[in-house]
Amino acid sequence: VQLQASGGGLVQAGGSLRLSCATSGLIFSNYNMGWFRQAPGKGREFVASISRSISWNGPTTNYADSVTGRFAISRDNARNTVYLRMNSLKPEDTGVYYCAASGGTYYRRPADFDSWGQGTQVTVSS
């Protein structure tokens, strides 16, 4: 299983970025996917998650309170890729962003996820 995150960079406060996480070696549509971030000196923090697409009205999404209304997670099962659109970025959004895959029932805590990407750096300047 491989997860390859990309799309990070340096952006001014108020700007936008879109992160991508391309996966291989797994049946992507069977996995719940998540994004986490880690700021220097801090632990890994949940950002957003999206469920496997098993319901008639599409996958379920969840967000950390700090990003609700600014970030949007989505998935493209045909491309085996999950995205994180980040708008109205703030300096406190700075960190390394990781994508992760969960084959189990739960997909909120880092321990719920089986596989992790290598991370992509996001830096938001004030």
Image (tube, grey):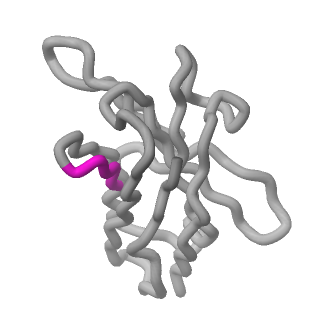
Asked where in the image residue 93 lies, by quadrant, the reply is bottom right
- The residue shown at (53%, 75%) is 122
**Magenta stretch holds residue 80:** yes
Relative to 79, is 7 above or below? below
**Magenta stretch holds residue 107:** no
- The residue shown at (54%, 45%) is 100
Q: Is residue 118 visible?
A: yes
- The spot of residue 54 in percent (x, y) is 26, 15
Residue extending farthest to the front is 25
Secondary structure, magenta segment, majority class: strand
Relative to 61, is 39 above or below? below
Relative to 81, is 97 above or below? below
Asked where in the image residue 7 lies, by quadrant, the reply is bottom left
Number of numbered labels in the structure image: 0
Q: Is residue 33 left or right of residue 119?
A: left
- The residue shown at (69%, 38%) is 110
- The spot of residue 58 in percent (x, y) is 19, 23
- The spot of residue 91 in percent (x, y) is 56, 74
Relative to 46, is 122 above or below? below
Q: Nearer the viewer, residue 2 or 95?
A: 2
Q: Is residue 66 visible?
A: no
- The residue shown at (62%, 34%) is 113
- The spot of residue 71 in percent (x, y) is 36, 52
Q: Nearer the viewer, residue 46 or 93?
A: 46
Q: Which residues make up the magenta segment? A: 79-83
Q: Nearer the viewer, residue 86 or 52?
A: 52
